[in-house]
Amino acid sequence: MDANNNRNGKILGILHALYEKASDTKSSIDEARYKESLDKLFETTAWGFREILLVVIIGMKIDPLFRASCGLYDCKPRAIYEGPIKEFFIAKNIPHRKSGPLNVAKATVGLDMTWAAQRRPSDVAEEVVHLVGLLEENAESDPSVVDCVGVSLMRRFIAKAHELASLAVAIKPNEDPEFLFWLCHELIEKTPDAGNTPQKISALLLKCYHTSFRTGVEVTGGEDRASVTSTTSKKPGDINEERSNVIYKVYEVTVKCFDLARIRDSFDCISIYNKNHDTNINEIVVICRKEDCPLDMKESGLKTYLGSYSYQNIRYYFWEINEWIANTLQRMTPKGRGEFYILLNEYINETNTAEVVKRLWKELHGCK
């Protein structure tokens, strides 16, 4: 434990030193050899690539002999990122992902062209390989290159943090269900953010509905990103209504095709959950668009409740997402709708919410 604490303390010291140098506006760095590559890491929505580069730089600062091109895991990247780096990012309000660099480097030995070819976008991954190559080629002859790239990288992290902070919107109280529905519709239609937007909106609606009527029902799953699987979260669905750890209702929220493959994955998660918790969950509410439903679904003939699909002992009930949102808003108390608006604004203003969502939210509120 002491060894880990010492290592983490050393890493935090390195990060703060890089931050201090990056914040010095009087200091200039010649980025000619790597500017284009570094810029590309901040032009993609896949944040893990810029985060894995920071892990590499820290690894080389700790151990000059560390070589990410052939032995990435020699530096114990998970411990570096999920410990001191995340702590530092949170303290400095720097946007980051929960396990971004670990996801882009999953199941790889080293950051080389073979690794890059298997990642998306591969051209951005290739820039990481280029930067790692530059660092390793100069590790012995000119170790200052590691510091220069580290400071340049940190400057971009700081600039991105300031840029996203400037997109925050200050809202006025509003309980109008039609206005709130319009906001939700525009966000989901234009910036679904890989499913995060509709999932967050649905979770907040359910949370505020239960809070406004004091039902005592807790809504879980809303804090997870859409990329987090039910297996990882150890919950049977995207969103769950529960009380005293007993799940009453399970929801899946999507604006992608909820086909047989997705249903099988869901079934596996529910089966594991039922087995581990001695429960019998056998109904799932799927909030989606009509075009996302299985082709062989048993149609209801209705516009809001679209139909059902049975897979083994699980039945899936499909609800049209826009109708469901409008209906839920109408059934909420005015106070509940006002609280939903506040919480949605807080989510969009959070450091880690996607920039495209922030920009649209600002536009929807008439801000330039």
Image (cartoon, rainbow, N blue to C red):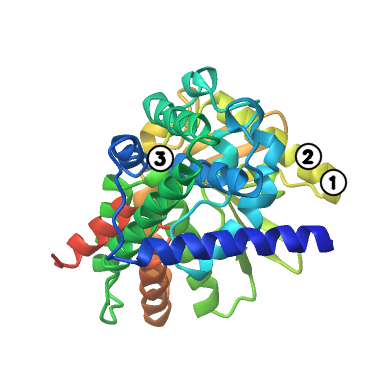
Q: Residue furthest front?
A: 141
Q: How many marks are shown on the rendered structure?
A: 3
Q: Indicate which disc residue 276 carries.
A: 1
Looking at the picture, which amino acid does disc 3 mark? Val
Give the Cα distance between marks 2 and 3: 25 Å
Q: In the rendered structure, are the residues bearing label 2 and label 1 in contact, judged by CB atoms less than 8 Å apart?
A: yes
Identify the element where label 3 is drawn.
loop
Looking at the picture, which amino acid does disc 1 mark? Asn
Q: Is residue 282 above or below residue 361?
A: above
**Residue 352 located left or right of residue 215:** left
Q: In the rendered structure, are the residues bearing label 2 and label 3 in contact, judged by CB atoms less than 8 Å apart?
A: no
Instruction: Please name whichever residue, 26 or 341, is drawn nearer the observer in this view of the structure.
Output: 26
Q: Indicate which disc residue 272 carries.
A: 2
Image quarter where the N terminus lies is bottom right
The residue where tag 3 is placed is 255
x, y percent for residue 85? 58, 57
Residue name at image x 32 percent, y 59 percent: 159
Identify the element where label 2 is drawn.
helix
x, y percent for residue 240? 62, 56
